[in-house]
Amino acid sequence: QSGGTFTGGSGTITFSGASTFSGGTFTGGSGTLDFNESVTISGTAFTSTTGTASFARNLTVSGTGTFAPNAGTVVFDGAGGTQTVDVLTSVTFTHLTISKFTGQSLTVAANDTLSVTGTLTLTDGVIDQTTIPVDGTIKLTSAGAGLSNASTFDVGSGRLNITGIGVVKICGRVRVRV
């Protein structure tokens, strides 16, 4: 999309090829957005769906582009090697799921922070960082935020900060490496 307005509805929209949003406005609606290749947002005001948006490859936000998760669930679920998220410093998600195949990595770009105010679900995969950001990789930041993890998830060389205002719920087995 290089201009104009895109407004999604309540159904499923699948993007099979690489997607570049370089101008205009994208509003995801309330359905499901399924991106099967890399997504670049460089000049678009991109507001995701209130449903579920899945990203199978890299997500890059640069230039004057903006990415607003829109109170929905964002899923990073790519199976083809390392997947990189680069978001112009920080993005706050309501719900975030990392569901990669065993041993597949999600890398959050250096000095970027992904904050989660609702539920962070760690199903499978590894958070892999070359450089640990100063302020953290992924943060749970509000009272009542929850962490649900499967036994096949490995924080790897990344950092997971849990800083709640009140009680933070952790469901599942947690192994702490010091």
Image (cartoon, grey):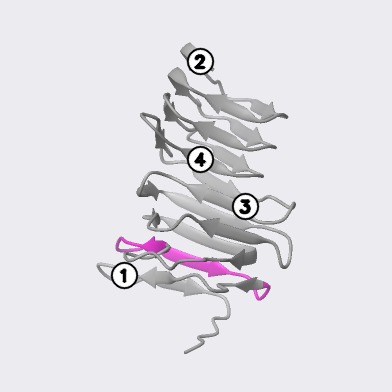
* Residue in the image at 50% along x and 40% along y: 60
Comes first in the chain, label 2 or label 3? 2
SS class of the residue under badge 1?
loop
Comes first in the chain, label 3 or label 4? 4
Q: Where is 74 relative to 123, above or below?
A: above
Tell me the kind of residue under disc 3. Answer: Gln
Q: Nearer the viewer, mark 3 or mark 1?
A: 3
What range of the chain is rendered magenta?
138-152
Circle 4 Cα neighbour tier, 10 Å, few/some/many (<14 / 14–19 / ≥20): some
- Which mark is on residue 163? 1
Comes first in the chain, label 3 or label 1? 3
- Which mark is on residue 60? 4
Residue lying at the far left of the rendered structure: 165
SS class of the residue under badge 2?
strand
Residue lying at the far bottom of the rendered structure: 178
Residue 146 in the image: state x and y as whole percent. Answer: 44, 64
Comes first in the chain, label 1 or label 2? 2
